[in-house]
Image (cartoon, helix red, strand yellow):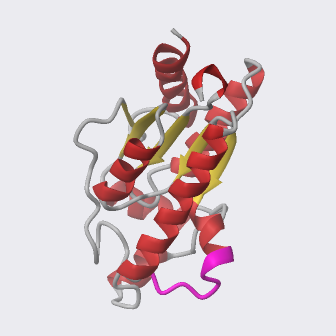
Amino acid sequence: MGNNSGWCVWITGLPGSGKSTIALTLLQILSRKGVRAQILSSDALRKVMTPNPKYSLEERNNVYATLVFIAKLLTENGVNTIIDATGNLRQYRETARKQIPRFMEAYIKCSIEICIKRETKRGKTFHAPEKIYERALRGEAPTVPGIGVPYEEPLHPEVTVDSSTQTPEECAQKIFKKILEQFYA
């Protein structure tokens, strides 16, 4: 692998915390600096793997195992990878950390209350399901992280940003700075 291997940044946080927007903003920053990267979205992957998702633990385990496998392959082939995924259980992110040598975790901190407000107002969901909190609060979607199933915050992320007090650009810039320190210093 050596210098030819790519790096991987897992952008994690509650649904509605701004992961996809920050991932896209980070990709633009990297592109302006001449650094190529690929975004791997769990929501996009889920549409291929499970067109009618149930969001069961077994389904989540399969989706995240596949996501980590793809990220590992990409980095082994020199492709810098940004994982855009809630990864509600720490074990998913820790599996990536163990399997991908040049790995870092970026935690998008945001209260559930703000995530719910954002989710009800957002027009573009990228690949995410729509109105998940609304459905969860009505009891129609019992497996939404932070409501029906736990979201386990990272214990030791390499970088934490607060999307409730910082713009997506500020969050992405902070993650970019950490990428430079960790992978290019």
Identify the residue shown where x is 55% and y is 64%: 66
Which region shows up in magenta? 48-55
For this orientation, the residue located farthest to the top is 185
Pick the residue in front: 80 or 1: 1
Give the total number of marks visible in the rendering: 0
User: Compared to 114, does 21 lie above or below?
Assistant: above
**Does the magenta stretch mainly form a helix, a strand or a loop?**
loop
User: Compared to 89, does 100 lie above or below?
Assistant: above
Image quadrant containing the N terminus: top right
- Relative to residue 33, is residue 121 drawn left or right? left
Identify the residue shown where x is 38% and y is 52%: 95
Pick the residue in front: 20 or 85: 85
Percent coordinates x, y for residue 126 in the rendering: 66, 61
Query: Is residue 53 located in the magenta-colored stretch of the structure?
Result: yes
Identify the residue shown where x is 58% and y is 49%: 71
User: Compared to 165, does 39 lie above or below?
Assistant: below
User: Compared to 141, does 80 lie above or below?
Assistant: above
- Relative to residue 88, is residue 35 drawn left or right? right
Percent coordinates x, y for residue 135 in the rendering: 43, 83
Identify the residue shown where x is 44% and y is 52%: 17
- Relative to residue 131, is residue 153 drawn left or right? left
Percent coordinates x, y for residue 86 in the rendering: 43, 58
Percent coordinates x, y for residue 151 in the rendering: 29, 61
For this orientation, the residue located farthest to the left is 155
